[in-house]
Image: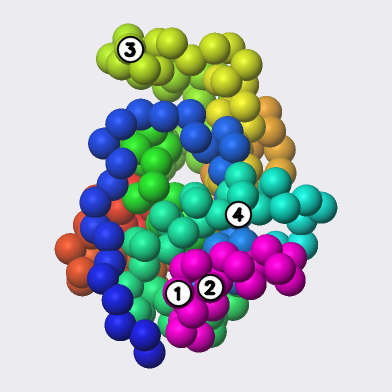
Amino acid sequence: MVKRDVCNSVSKEYSARMTGNQFLYPEFKVAVKLLQEGLSKKEATDKIINENLFEYRSFKAINKHIGAVWERANYLDDYLIEVLLTEPNEIGRLINFYAILKYDRLFLEFMEEVLIDKVFSRQMEVSKSDISNYFSIKAEQSETVANFKETTLKRLRLAYFEILSGAGYIGTNRDNAELTIPLGIYQITNHLEEIGDKRYAKAMLG
């Protein structure tokens, strides 16, 4: 197994970058597999572009997402890499979800401040208004969020639903979706607790 340094920090700034880089699970798995095969990020990027491994219609789309994919990959340790590449996709998607929590502070705090409370109070559903209310609260706390345009907030709401759906927390309903705890989550959250990432284990509802 390839040994490498793991990035343990999380973005300290709020951003709207999830509007352009959403779940990206197939791309994430392809990129991590290339690193595990011993390629450098540059070599892997060249291979992804030259062979169109993301199966995009244009190279522009690859360039748009590849930076986010690599940044998320930095958060995986050897155990998570092995599980991502060998276990069923349902588990791999949860690893990708964990990487997104590390990647994006605004989404992490959404899980902590909205979804955790819902689970504890047994309100097992999430709606557009839940997400909109969260953004309104954050706008009062952060000038960055306050300056988001309405079109940006709309795209973020859609992105949050896509991420939750991609990881198995909700179905495909985008108005009032039933919230569930994904199968297999404790395999990941137990490991996160063991390595000291208890905040993220809790945010995943583990």
Mark 4 or 3, nearer chain start:
4
Under mark 2, the amino acid is: Glu
Left/right placement of residue 113 relative to residue 163 reads left
Rounded to the nearest angstrom, the CA distance separating label 3 from label 1 is 38 Å
Q: Residues within 10 Å of mark 1 (few under 14, many from 20)?
A: few
Query: Which type of secondary structure does the marked residue at label 1 adopt?
Result: loop
Q: Residues within 10 Å of mark 2 (few under 14, many from 20)?
A: few
Question: What's the residue at 62%, 21% (across, down)?
Answer: 154
Within the image, what quadrant is residue 24 found in?
bottom right
Q: Which marked residue is nearer to the observer: mark 4 or mark 2?
A: 2
- Please tell me which residue lies in front, 149 or 83: 149
On the image, the x and y values in percent for residue 121 come to 37, 36
Instruction: Point out the stretch of residues depicted in magenta.
Output: 33-53
Question: What's the residue at 24%, 58% (across, down)?
Answer: 8
Rounded to the nearest angstrom, the CA distance separating label 4 from label 2 is 20 Å
Q: For mark 3, what is the residue?
A: 143
Question: What's the residue at 28%, 67% (across, down)?
Answer: 6
Under mark 1, the amino acid is: Ser
On the image, the x and y values in percent for residue 13 come to 30, 31
Query: Which type of secondary structure does the marked residue at label 2 adopt?
Result: helix
- Please tell me which residue lies in front, 115 or 106: 106
Q: For mark 2, what is the residue?
A: 43
